[in-house]
Amino acid sequence: MVKKLLNFLHRHKHIRRILFGTTLLLLMVFIATRIYYSLTPQMNVILISIDTLRPDHMGVYGYARNTTPNIDAFAKNATVFTQAYTVIPMTEPSFTALLTGKSPFNTRVITNGGIPVSSNVPTLATILKKVNYITATFTTGIYPKAIDLGRGFDTQEFYQYKYYSSKNNSEYYTEGDNRTYDNLIQHAVNWLHNNRKTKFFLWVHLLDPHAPYIPPRNIVCKFLTKSECQHVSKMTQVQIETLRAQYQQCQEKKVPPEVVSIMRALYDAEILNADRLEGELLNQLKKDDNDKKTVVVIYGDHGEGFDHNYYFNHREVLYNSAVHIPLIIKDPEISHSGTESILLQNIDILPTLLDLLHVSKKDYLFDGKSFASLFSNNPLSQLRLFLHKREIYASNSTWTKFSVSDGAYSYIYSLPGSCRLNGQAEELYNIVLDPGEERNLITGMPEVAARMKNDLFNYLSRYNLPQATPINKNENAATHEKALQDIKGFAY
Ligand SMILES: [Zn+2]
């Protein structure tokens, strides 16, 4: 049979030529397709961020309470980063750093409502838009458009924080109409379904754990003791918020442990609600059979203080409780899963994502460094990773506190007028053995302290820092007053 075919081809020269040409063409198409697919991003991206979420309050990071069942289940097949930090523990500057890959030391975006990022700076959305992604953002608590981070999004939906509604058992209403917070997430879920056949980037931001700690009524007692539950059930939302707010910020004296216990439990119930909504998004992704075509990033912008001398807030301090953030990444193209302890900051996430998506970085300048080599089996890549970052630097939102960490020790320097613990200007903690940072080693380990202080001040000198900046003490009081006005009269 083969012999007959060969004889036939030998006799018919033109058929031979057609066959050869067709094979060559098919081969070229095959190679071109392979190159196209290796150079062109094909994966969707979902960024789900939860405001004020401490990793040590999540099951996946070892928390005893069952606050994050959906995230825990998802994380089983993902990479969980245990040493991810924000460069600044405040919402708008933290997201600016995440979405631009640029450090606030460079951009000077260090406070909410301060200078926004320049409209010339590329963001994750504008970069992905250039490579033909359909983009959308559904947020509450942060309005991307107002801080010049809305660029590049085709669809933007923002809900203003209002109050808890016992009628709808939903925490947030938007301005001017009756849409609930759950509606916002439902809209994001619908968008996900409607765009299931396109290449998309979706960013959803959930505000739940941010103060005031007022979870939906059906879970308000979830983590309270029986007596705490009886006590809280008799309180109005204004009373709960007043109880929290009288202790927020820097405290000279210890906050009563029973108040901390109640606030922690309410904060945890807020996390549970955010996890429920996050679960709805992840479920939709699976239902649409898009979970194998989507890189998912679960992220927190900063933590929250429940200890030291700083309670029920973030922004002003640089303890682990404020700067340590959750980061979980799942890329279906790679089989990597489990925990990773590489030292990284939120500015590193954008360049990493671009590498994972095969988007060229050559036109962009980031302060962050990609850690995508973590997912490679190449020994040279692994070596690059080893050299990734020896030290990371952070500041608070008034540039009155600065810190350096090498993953083992954290050194914090506080200017006069900032929230100093027992009046101390310098603090040194072993964050491996003492993650709660309870034992200040500043006098016990003078050599480590001197080395880190030297590194920190060398780094800061590049930015003409430190410079004393006046603190606007009235700002927090005004924010609190507004919150009380918003929730007035809405009892559980
Ligand atoms: Zn925030």
Image (cartoon, rainbow, N blue to C red):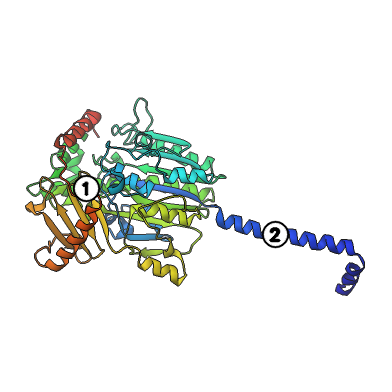
**Looking at the image, residue 362 lies above or below residue 389:** above
Mark 2 and ligand 1: say if the CB distance to the nearest ligand atom is below 8 Å.
no
Report the amino acid beneath label 2. Met
Mark 2 to mark 1: distance in Å? 56 Å
Which quadrant of the rendered structure holds the N terminus? Answer: bottom right
Query: Which quadrant of the view contains residue 328?
Result: bottom left
The crowding category of the residue bearing disc 1, from other C-alpha atoms within 10 Å (few below 14, some 14 to 19, many at least 20), is many
Q: Secondary structure at mark 1?
A: loop
Q: In the displayed structure, does residue 154 sit left or right of residue 233?
A: right
Total numbered circles: 2
Residue carrying label 2: 28
x and y, in percent, of residue 396 in the image: 21, 48
Q: Residue at x 24, y 41 (%)?
A: 211
Q: Outermost residue, right direction?
A: 11
Q: Residue at x 91, y 68 (%)?
A: 8
Q: In the displayed structure, does residue 361 sit left or right of residue 492?
A: right
Q: Which one is nearer the viewer's eye here, 235 or 487?
A: 487
Q: Which one is nearer the viewer's eye here, 269 or 15?
A: 15
Q: Residue at x 44, y 72 (%)?
A: 379
Which quadrant of the rendered structure holds the C terminus? Answer: top left
**Looking at the image, residue 43 lies above or below residue 135:** below
**Looking at the image, residue 425 lies above or below residue 382:** above
Mark 1 and ligand 1: say if the CB distance to the nearest ligand atom is below 8 Å.
no
Q: In the displayed structure, does residue 449 sit left or right of residue 55?
A: left
The answer to whether residue 378 shows anywhere in this view is yes
Q: In the displayed structure, does residue 126 sit left or right of residue 89?
A: right
Residue carrying label 1: 396
Q: Which one is nearer the viewer's eye here, 234 or 208?
A: 208
- Of callouts 2 and 1, the N-terminal one: 2
Report the amino acid beneath label 1. Asn
